[in-house]
Image (cartoon, helix red, strand yellow):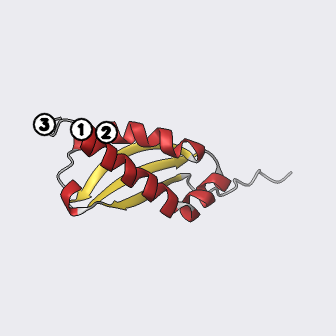
Amino acid sequence: MHPKRRRHTRPLQMLLHLELPADRSNINIPKLDFLGRRATHICGEWGCVLRAFNANPERSVLLIEARSRTKREQLSTCFDEINLAVSRLFDEFAVGCDSNF
């Protein structure tokens, strides 16, 4: 009897790099953690946001774990849609929150 071969599965996690408008570049890590939780709601159809962090002053990164391999493929094709949704979230957040958060 042959030993079972382990199927190679692609990891379900992927990083989405979000370009931030210049005036949003001062969003700090606690704000991004909060945004990550809100973004989980937006990205819920595809998966959940595991982590949000600043890669550099002009860019933030969301680490998203897709619900399934198909959702992972959709995630990469829906990037613009997610980016737009999260950009709107940044805008709402900037308007609706105290800057000393």
Residue at image mark 2 = 33
Q: Position of residue 79 (x, y in %)?
A: 50, 61
Q: Are marks 1 and 2 in contact (CB under 8 Å)?
A: yes
Amino acid found under the numbered disc labelled 2: Asp
Q: Nearer the viewer, residue 84 or 35?
A: 84
The CA distance from mark 3 to mark 2 is 15 Å
Residue at image mark 3 = 100
Q: Residue at x 77, y 51 (%)?
A: 3
Select label 3 or label 1 by which is in front: 3
Q: Residues within 10 Å of mark 3 (few under 14, many from 20)?
A: few
Camera sees residue 80: yes
Q: Is residue 67 above or below residue 74?
A: above
Within the image, what quadrant is residue 61 found in? bottom left
Q: Residue at x 58, y 48 (%)?
A: 46
Q: Residues within 10 Å of mark 2 (few under 14, many from 20)?
A: some
The CA distance from mark 3 to mark 1 is 11 Å
Identify the mark nearer the N-term, 3 or 1. 1
Amino acid found under the numbered disc labelled 3: Asn
Does 11 sit left or right of 21 as displayed? right
Give the SS element for disc 3: loop
Amino acid found under the numbered disc labelled 1: Pro
Q: Position of residue 91 (x, y in %)?
A: 31, 49
Give the SS element for disc 2: helix
Within the image, what quadrant is residue 17 found in? bottom left
Q: Position of residue 22 (x, y in %)?
A: 21, 62
Residue at image mark 1 = 30
Does 88 sit left or right of 96 as displayed? right
